[in-house]
Image (cartoon, rainbow, N blue to C red):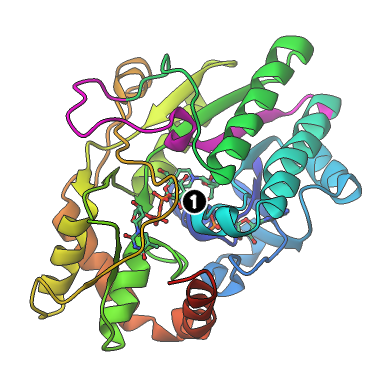
Amino acid sequence: MSNLLVTGGAGFIGSNFVHYVLEHTDHTVTVLDKLTYAGNLASLEGLPAGRFRFVKGDIADASVVDGLVAEADAVVHYAAESHNDNSLDDPRPFLDTNIIGTYTLVEAARRHGKRFHHISTDEVYGDLELDDPERFTEQTPYNPSSPYSSTKAGSDLLVRAWVRSFGLQATISNCSNNYGPYQHVEKFIPRQITNVLRGERPKLYGTGENVRDWIHANDHSSAVLTILEKGVIGETYLIGADGEKNNKEVVEAILVALGQPTDAYDLVTDRPGHDLRYAIDSTKLRTELGWTPQYSDFASGLADTIAWYRDNEAWWAPQKDATEARYRAQGQ
Ligand code: NAD
Ligand code: DAU
């Protein structure tokens, strides 16, 4: 039994991880989260008080971070500014949190000799052609496209350097696009589901041909736990569940599930620098650590996710108007 410090645990993937850990292990969890617009305490309701504690604070604030890292057995670092569109509008918070925040955490983990797991993204590798036979592997060179992905790439490189130069006991994982409950309505799948639930049309960037490699958030959580338990210090593991779909297919599936015609969406101005395709080869994680995804049927995972948003309007409604206003201000 360990005490995990989970940064960003009030966000989408972090909160799913906290629920997963408390359900499937004996670990205790402390969440450190700044509660930016993306953090939501409602995502952590109902957790067992004896095994769970929430601390509001900034990962870039060494005075907060130091004591919490000292108390923990391991740090699982999810906190980030995570949305590409926001990074194109205002990159600065991405540098502060993703770079300086990660620096602050690895320094504390080094000082206290603590196990550190860094959560990152497949976007650090740039993008693939639609017909590229190769997928991303741990050997793919870094080639990030956006302010978001470049700051994530920078944070990965900090962790690698701290392992080599200071002996930090760290692992890194780079995962593909997650879906599931508690995802902010700024992101593609929840934005389109909640648009349709509100009687509005989904918004597809460009022609909708861009491909993402979808994985259920619970599969991401089980992979991270596997790496924490069995991962080799200094190693990077790619996490993916063979879930490639283009955006048009995903919007059409949402429309069908909600009883709408498949063409009831709008094509809107494309995202500048929009990555064309991501695809993960997770052979290393599967063969070396024995991980397998459990939610490999995207259609049923999507149906569950749609049902969750239909049943939890009180969770997302307060964010929806502000999110759409932000998109309008960004030119959509
Ligand atoms: P999110 O935006 O939903 O959540 C981020 C959380 O971090 C929020 O709760 C926010 O309040 C918190 N936070 C932000 N800045 C902070 C700071 N300075 N100090 C403390 N807390 C802060 O993000 P997400 O989609 O859950 O992503 C979590 C992590 O997973 C990120 O590191 C992201 O790069 C990575 N990732 C995401 C995906 C995906 O599909 N969403 C895929 C691969 C990797
Ligand atoms: O690949 C992992 C990454 O996945 C994570 O590192 C990021 O944190 C996460 O946000 C996600 O990045 P994307 O940019 O792929 O996700 P997003 O949900 O913003 O968009 C998914 C795709 O859908 C992308 O091709 C852009 C498109 N899109 C997005 C929105 C919000 C639309 O067509 N319409 C939209 O309204």
Quarter location, residue 52: bottom right
- Given residues 145 and 95, the one toward you in this image is 145
Q: How crowded is mark 1: few (under 14 residues within 10 Å), some or many (20 or more)?
A: many
Please identify the quadrant where the N terminus is shown.
top right
Name which residue lies at 50% across and 23% down.
Answer: 142
Please identify the quadrant where the C terminus is shown.
bottom left
Can residue 231 be seen in this snapshot?
no
Can residue 114 be seen in this snapshot?
yes
Please tell me whether residue 265 is drawn above or below residue 163 in the rendered image: below
**Which residue is denoted by mark 1 in the rendering?**
17
The amino acid pointed to by label 1 is Phe
Q: Where is residue 80 in the image (x, y as percent from the top left)?
A: 62, 49
Please tell me whether residue 196 is drawn above or below residue 119 in the rendered image: below
Q: In this view, does 198 lie to the left or right of 158?
A: left
Looking at the rendered structure, the secondary structure element under dot 1 is helix
- Given residues 299 and 27, the one toward you in this image is 299
Q: Where is residue 213 in the image (x, y as percent from the top left)?
A: 28, 42
- Given residues 119 and 81, the one toward you in this image is 81
Q: Position of residue 247 (x, y in %)?
A: 24, 55
Q: In this view, does 331 lie to the left or right of 295?
A: right
Q: Magenta segment: does it hold 289? A: no
Q: Is residue 139 left or right of residue 39?
A: left
Name which residue lies at 75% across and 43% down.
Answer: 101
Which residues make up the magenta segment? 112-135
- Given residues 302 and 322, the one toward you in this image is 322
Q: Magenta segment: does it hold 119? A: yes
Name which residue lies at 32% across and 26% down.
Answer: 282
